[in-house]
C-alpha cells in the first residue's frame, strides 16, 4: 500500500538508494494491477514480460552506480491511442483489435528514452470519442471512487489507473477535455499542454487540429516531471512548435501573490451543478486568500464553443478515420467487392459514437454544406480564440470547473447531446489551443471535483505554479479511493 | 465525314508530372522507380494510424520553379487540403493536395503549329501526392476477382498542371503537351520519363458547332501516358462525340478511360454516385508563405528554357526547323551546346548532330546522353574538316570509328593515315598520271564538256583513297588542262 | 437546415458505412438534433472574420530531401488482413 501511493520523487530516491530495485517495483505495481483490475478495468493490455525485461536492464545500470533519470525504472502506462512498437494499439476499437504498430509514437520513444517501464495500454472511448469510456469497443472502465460510475473519458483508463494507484503516472490525450474531465472525475491531476508542445506523431488522430497529449498524475509535481520528459519540438510533427522547453519543475513555488486570476462568468452557467460550483468557488477563494488577485471576466463567445467543436472535430475525424478500410491493417469484413468490403468493415469495426461522428463530419464537409458548417465553425473558432486573447491581456490564469457535474453512473446518460454538454468547459480551451490543468479541488457526495486552470499559450508554468500552491495548501489530493485500502 | 467539318473541338489538359526529388513528398522514402513491390514504404506513406506528414522542401522549390517556367504567379500564401475519396491505392483514403490556394496560377506557354504561334493559358499548378499501383489478377480491372496493391509510388510528389480550355485542334494539344514536357525537363522539374509513367495526362474535350461560343458537354479521359495515346484517344473521342451529336444525342459528362489495346475510350461509371471530394484544409500541415526572396533565388538559378534556346540557336544562324529539332530533346540540345563550346560553326555542327550522329545513335538505339562520341570529339572532328586536314567524306568514316573505338578523331586520322594530301608536288604527280591515263576525258573537257572534269577528279580521289584535298585537286587539274 | 433520411443514406455511402434501417433512422434523428444545436452559429456575424485552422500558427514547416530507410516488405505486410506475393490483396474493385 505504501509503495503504490508514493510520488515520483520518492520512488526515484528509493531506486537510487537501492532500497528497492526497478524489477521489484515493477512487480509490486503489476501485482497491484492484478488485484485491482477485476474491478477497475483500466487496462486493455498488460505488458508484464517486456516491462520486467526493461526493469531488469535499468537494475543493471543502478547496480553499476550509473546515474538514472527521474522517471527511470518507474512503471508507466499509455492510453491505447499512442503507438507502441510491437505492442497492440487498439484505440479502444474493434477495427484495430489486431493492429500491432511497427513504430513508436514520439511520446513512447521519449518515455523509453527516459527509462520509464511501460506496463500496459489503457482503456479509452473508441478513437477518443466520448466522455465516459463507455464507448470503448471492449468494456467500460470503472471509477475507482465508485465502481458503478464512469471514470470520465476519453482517457478514462489513464485517469482511473492513476486514481487506483496502478501506475505512478500515465499519458492521456485531450481533444475536447479528454484528459481534464477524467482527471476531475477520478480525483487526479491532468494537464492538456498547449497545442504543439507535445508531439502528436504516433498518436492515432481523432481531430488533428485539437488533439494533444498530456500527463495524468497524483500530484502537480509529478505532472511537471512527466511533462519534462514528453514535451518538446518534434520534426516528425509539422504542427509541433519549436519552443524553448523550460524545466517545468522550476515553476513549482508555493506562492500566488499578485497572480491575476480571471473567473469567466460563462463557465458558471446553466448545467453547472450547484454543489460543484460551491467547490470551485471555495477553490478560488483559497487562492485569493493566498494572495491571488481574482476578478470576474467574460468570454462572450463561449456558448458557441460546443457547436463549433461538434462541427470541426467530427469533420476532421471523418477524414482521419477514412483509412480504416480493411486493406492494410485492422479488421476486415469479407465481401465480394471493394465497396461492400469497405462498407461492411467499417460498419462492423466501428462503434455507434464513432459512426455518428463520421456521419456528422462527412455531412458537414459535403458539397453545399461546407461553408454553412465547417467554414462557419472555423470563423467562430477565430472569435473564441480572440476572446481568450483579450482576457489574457489582463489575467495570468483563468479558473473554472472542469466539468459541470461529478462522475455519473455507467449507463445513466445515453443522449449524445447531453453527453456533449458535459465538455462545455473544456472544449473552448482546445479550440484556442491553450494549456489547461485539472486538479482535485474537493468532493461532492464522496466523488472528486476538478478545478480547471487555463493559461496562455506555452505558459504551462503559471498553471503549475497556481496548481502547486493550491495543492500545498489543501488536502484533496491526499484522499485515496476507499477500495484501494481493501485490496492493498 | 470528319468531325471538324461541322464542329470545333475545345480541349484542356490536366498534366501530372512526377517531380524529380530524391524522397517522397511527405516522408523520407525513396522515389526511385522500379523497386520490388511494397519496399519503398514507411509508416507515413503507408498511412498507418498515428503518422504525420512533413513537407519536402525540394517539392516546394521545384513547384516554384515550374511556376516561373510557365509564367505563373507564385502565391504568397498557399496551403494543402485533403481530397477525400475511397480507393484501395490511396492509403489514407484521402489525397493530400491543394484546392483553393494552389502554389502557382495564371500562367501560359506558347506553342507553334504550322508556323502560327498561340499562347495556351495555364490555370494553375499545384503540389500533391501520387497514389499506389493496383495489379489485377485478371487482364483488366473489370475482369479481375481480386487485385494486389503496391504502395511504392504512394507519396511520390506530383505537380498537377491545369491548362485553360484553349486548344482547338489535336495538333495544338500535341504541341502544348510537347512544349510543356520540354519545359518540365529543361527546368529540371521532372525526368519526364514517359515510359515510367513520370508524366500522365487527363484530357478534357468537348465539341461545339463551328461559330458557337458556348462550350459543349465535355468528357474527361484519365491517365494517358504518351503523346501517341493522347492523339489516338482524342481522334477516337472526337469521332465518338460527333456521332452522338449528329444523331441528336447528348454527351454525358463523365470520366472515361483509354483502352490502348482496343483503341477506344470507355466509360468509368461505378457503383458510387458522383464524387464529393469534401475538400478541407489539411490539419496536419502548416501553410506556406513564399516571399520574394525565395522566388528570386529560384528564378536566378533557372536554366535556359526551350523557347529561349530555340531563339538563341536561330540567332546563331540555324533555321527555325533545325533549332526546333535540336531543342526537342533536352539531351540533344545539351550535346549541341557542349560541342558548340569547342566548335563555333553552329550550322555545320547542327548538320552533323542532326545528320550523321543522330543516324549512328538511332541505328544503335543509343541516346545522346550515352553517346560514345563525346561533344568534344565531334567538335574535334569538325575542326579537322574545317582546317582542311581531312575531307568531309573522310569525316564520315572517322565519326564511325570514334563511335566504335572511342578514340579521339586526331588519333584515328593519324593511325589510319587519313590526313588530307595538300602537298602540291605529290598531287601534281598523281594528276599527271591520271591525265595521261584518260586522254578521252581530257579531250572532252578541252572540247568544252565541263562535266568531264568531274570524272577526272573522281579518278584522282580514287587514286588517293579520298585523301586528296578536293579544292587543291580542282585548282591544279584545271591549271594543267588549260596548259 | 434539416437533414433528410435520403441525405443520411448519401452521407453513409460517402463515408463507406453500411447502416441498418434502425441506424439510418436513429442517425437522421440524432444528426438533426446536433445540427439544430449547431444552427446557433448562424446567430453570429462572421463577415470579415478569417477562419482558424490551427490555434497556433506556424509557416513553412519543411524537411530536407534526404532518403531515410523504408520498411522491409515483411514488416509492411505484417498487419495486412490479406496479402500475397508482396502485395496487399483486395477483392474485386468494380
Image (cartoon, grey):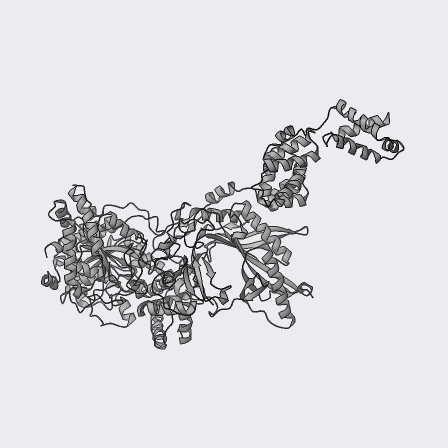
Picture coordinates of residue B199, whole percent (x, y): 53, 53
Task: Residue at the far right: name it.
Answer: B447
Judged left or right of residue A269, residue B135 is: right
The one of B348 and B167 positioned closer to us in this rendering: B348
Q: Residue at position x 31%, y 60% from top?
A: A99
- The quadrant holding residue A271 is bottom left
Judged left or right of residue B176, residue C51 is: left
Picture coordinates of residue B34, whole percent (x, y): 47, 51
Task: Residue at the far front: name it.
Answer: B437
Q: Quadrant where the C terminus of chain B lies?
A: top right
Picture coordinates of residue B213, whole percent (x, y): 63, 64
Q: Quadrant where the N terminus of chain B lies?
A: bottom right
Q: Is residue A258 visible?
A: no
Q: Is residue B354 visible?
A: yes
- The quadrant holding residue A177 is bottom left
Residue A358 drawn above or below residue B160: below
Task: Residue at the far top: name it.
Answer: B425
The one of A54 and A2 positioned closer to us in this rendering: A54
The one of C8 and A440 positioned closer to us in this rendering: C8
Picture coordinates of residue A229, whole percent (x, y): 24, 49
Amino acid at each position: 500500500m505504501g509503495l503504490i501511493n508514493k510520488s515520483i520523487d520518492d520512488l526515484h530516491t528509493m531506486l537510487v538508494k537501492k532500497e528497492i530495485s526497478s524489477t521489484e517495483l515493477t512487480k509490486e505495481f503489476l501485482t497491484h494491477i492484478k488485484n485491482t483490475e477485476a474491478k477497475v478495468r483500466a487496462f486493455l493490455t498488460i505488458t508484464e514480460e517486456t516491462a520486467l525485461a526493461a526493469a531488469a536492464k535499468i537494475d543493471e545500470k543502478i547496480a553499476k552506480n550509473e546515474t538514472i533519470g527521474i522517471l527511470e525504472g518507474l512503471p508507466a502506462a499509455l492510453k491505447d491511442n499512442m503507438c507502441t512498437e510491437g505492442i497492440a494499439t487498439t484505440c479502444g476499437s474493434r477495427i484495430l483489435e489486431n493492429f500491432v504498430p511497427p513504430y513508436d509514437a514520439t511520446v513512447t520513444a521519449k518515455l523509453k528514452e527516459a527509462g520509464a517501464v511501460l506496463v500496459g495500454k489503457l482503456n479509452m472511448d473508441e478513437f477518443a470519442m466520448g466522455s465516459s469510456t463507455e464507448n470503448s469497443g471492449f468494456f467500460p472502465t470503472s471509477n475507482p471512487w465508485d465502481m458503478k460510475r464512469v471514470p470520465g473519458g476519453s482517457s478514462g483508463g489513464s485517469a482511473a489507473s492513476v486514481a487506483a494507484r496502478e501506475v505512478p503516472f500515465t499519458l492521456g490525450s485531450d481533444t475536447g477535455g479528454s484528459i481534464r474531465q477524467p482527471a476531475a472525475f477520478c480525483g487526479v491531476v491532468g494537464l492538456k499542454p498547449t497545442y504543439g508542445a507535445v508531439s502528436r506523431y504516433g498518436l492515432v488522430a481523432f481531430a488533428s487540429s485539437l488533439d494533444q497529449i498530456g500527463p495524468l498524475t497524483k500530484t502537480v509535481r509529478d505532472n511537471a516531471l512527466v511533462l519534462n520528459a514528453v514535451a518538446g519540438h518534434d520534426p516528425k510533427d509539422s504542427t509541433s512548435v519549436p519552443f524553448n522547453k523550460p524545466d517545468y519543475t522550476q515553476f513549482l513555488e508555493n506562492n500566488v501573490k499578485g497572480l491575476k486570476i480571471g473567473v469567466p462568468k460563462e463557465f458558471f452557467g446553466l448545467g453547472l451543478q450547484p454543489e460543484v460550483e460551491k467547490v470551485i468557488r471555495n477553490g478560488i477563494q483559497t487562492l485569493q486568500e493566498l494572495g491571488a488577485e481574482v476578478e470576474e471576466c467574460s468570454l462572450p463567445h463561449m456558448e458557441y464553443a460546443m457547436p463549433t467543436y461538434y462541427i470541426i472535430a467530427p469533420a476532421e475525424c471523418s477524414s482521419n478515420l477514412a483509412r480504416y478500410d480493411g486493406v492494410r491493417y485492422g479488421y476486415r469484413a469479407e465481401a465480394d467487392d471493394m465497396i461492400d468490403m469497405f462498407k461492411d468493415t467499417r460498419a462492423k469495426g466501428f462503434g455507434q459514437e464513432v459512426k455518428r461522428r463520421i456521419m456528422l463530419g462527412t455531412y458537414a464537409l459535403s458539397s453545399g454544406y461546407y461553408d454553412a458548417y465547417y467554414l462557419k465553425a472555423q470563423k467562430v473558432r477565430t472569435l473564441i480564440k480572440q476572446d481568450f486573447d483579450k482576457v489574457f491581456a489582463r489575467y495570468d490564469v483563468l479558473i473554472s470547473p472542469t466539468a459541470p457535474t461529478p462522475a455519473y453512473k455507467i449507463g445513466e446518460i445515453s443522449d449524445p447531446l447531453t453527453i456533449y454538454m458535459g465538455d462545455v468547459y473544456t472544449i473552448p480551451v482546445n479550440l484556442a489551443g491553450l494549456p489547461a490543468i485539472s486538479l482535485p479541488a474537493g468532493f461532492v457526495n464522496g466523488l472528486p471535483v476538478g478545478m480547471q486552470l487555463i493559461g496562455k499559450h506555452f505558459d504551462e508554468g503559471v498553471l503549475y505554479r497556481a496548481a502547486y500552491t493550491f495543492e500545498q495548501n489543501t488536502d484533496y489530493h491526499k484522499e485515496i479511493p476507499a477500495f484501494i485500502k481493501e485490496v492493498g | 465525314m470528319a468531325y471538324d467539318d461541322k464542329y470545333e473541338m475545345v480541349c484542356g489538359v490536366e498534366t501530372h508530372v512526377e517531380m524529380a526529388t530524391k524522397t517522397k513528398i511527405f516522408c523520407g522514402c525513396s522515389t526511385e522507380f522500379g523497386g520490388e513491390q511494397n519496399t519503398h514504404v514507411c509508416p507515413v506513406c503507408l498511412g498507418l494510424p498515428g503518422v504525420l506528414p512533413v513537407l519536402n522542401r525540394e517539392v516546394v522549390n521545384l513547384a516554384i520553379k515550374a511556376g516561373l517556367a510557365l509564367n505563373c504567379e507564385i502565391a504568397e500564401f498557399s496551403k494543402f487540403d485533403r481530397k477525400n475519396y475511397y480507393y484501395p491505392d490511396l492509403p489514407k483514403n484521402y489525397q493530400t493536395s491543394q484546392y483553393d490556394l494552389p502554389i502557382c496560377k495564371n500562367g501560359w506557354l506558347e506553342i507553334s503549329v504550322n508556323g502560327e504561334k498561340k499562347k495556351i493559358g495555364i490555370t494553375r499548378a499545384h503540389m500533391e501526392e501520387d497514389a499506389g499501383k493496383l495489379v489485377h489478377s485478371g487482364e483488366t480491372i473489370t475482369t479481375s476477382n481480386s487485385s494486389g496493391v503496391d504502395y511504392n509510388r504512394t507519396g511520390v510528389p506530383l505537380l498537377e498542371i491545369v491548362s485553360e480550355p484553349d486548344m482547338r485542334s489535336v495538333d495544338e494539344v500535341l504541341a502544348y503537351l510537347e512544349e510543356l514536357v520540354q519545359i518540365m525537363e529543361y527546368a529540371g522539374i521532372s525526368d519526364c520519363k514517359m515510359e515510367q509513367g513520370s508524366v500522365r495526362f487527363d484530357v478534357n474535350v468537348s465539341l461545339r458547332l463551328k461559330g458557337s461560343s458556348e462550350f459543349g458537354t465535355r468528357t474527361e479521359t484519365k491517365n494517358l501516358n504518351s503523346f501517341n495515346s493522347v492523339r489516338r484517344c482524342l481522334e477516337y473521342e472526337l469521332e465518338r462525340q460527333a456521332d452522338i451529336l449528329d444523331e441528336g444525342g447528348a454527351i454525358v459528362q463523365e470520366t472515361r478511360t483509354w483502352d490502348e489495346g482496343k483503341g477506344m475510350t470507355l466509360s468509368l461509371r461505378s457503383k458510387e454516385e458522383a464524387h464529393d471530394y469534401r475538400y478541407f484544409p489539411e490539419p496536419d500541415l502548416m501553410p506556406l508563405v513564399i516571399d520574394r526572396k525565395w522566388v528570386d533565388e529560384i528564378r536566378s538559378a533557372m536554366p535556359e528554357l526551350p523557347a529561349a534556346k530555340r531563339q538563341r540557336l536561330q540567332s546563331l544562324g540555324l533555321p527555325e526547323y533545325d533549332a526546333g529539332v535540336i531543342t526537342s530533346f533536352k539531351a540533344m540540345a545539351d550535346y549541341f551546346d557542349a560541342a558548340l563550346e569547342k566548335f563555333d560553326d553552329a550550322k555545320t555542327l547542327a548538320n552533323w548532330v542532326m545528320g550523321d550522329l543522330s543516324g549512328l545513335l538511332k541505328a544503335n538505339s543509343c541516346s545522346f546522353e550515352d553517346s560514345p562520341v563525346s561533344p568534344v570529339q565531334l567538335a574535334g572532328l569538325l575542326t579537322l574538316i574545317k582546317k582542311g586536314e581531312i575531307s568531309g567524306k573522310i569525316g564520315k568514316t572517322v565519326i564511325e570509328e570514334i563511335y566504335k573505338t572511342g578514340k579521339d578523331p586526331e588519333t584515328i586520322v593519324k593511325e589510319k593515315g587519313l590526313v588530307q594530301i595538300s602537298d602540291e608536288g605529290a598531287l601534281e604527280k598523281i594528276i599527271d598520271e591520271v591525265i595521261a591515263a584518260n586522254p578521252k576525258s581530257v579531250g572532252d573537257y578541252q572540247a568544252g564538256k565541263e562535266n568531264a572534269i568531274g570524272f577526272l577528279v573522281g579518278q584522282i580521289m580514287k587514286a588517293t583513297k579520298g585523301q586528296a584535298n578536293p579544292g587543291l585537286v580542282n585548282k591544279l587539274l584545271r591549271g594543267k588542262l588549260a596548259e | 437546415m434539416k437533414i433528410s433520411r435520403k441525405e443520411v443514406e448519401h452521407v453513409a455511402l460517402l463515408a463507406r458505412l453500411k447502416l441498418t434501417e434502425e441506424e439510418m433512422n436513429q442517425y437522421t434523428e440524432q444528426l438533426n438534433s446536433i445540427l439544430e444545436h449547431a444552427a446557433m452559429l448562424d446567430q453570429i456575424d462572421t463577415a470579415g472574420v478569417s477562419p482558424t485552422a490551427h490555434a497556433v500558427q506556424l509557416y513553412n514547416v519543411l524537411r530536407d530531401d534526404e532518403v531515410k530507410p523504408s520498411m522491409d516488405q515483411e514488416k509492411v505486410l505484417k498487419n495486412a488482413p490479406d496479402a500475397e506475393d508482396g502485395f496487399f490483396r483486395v477483392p474485386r474493385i468494380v
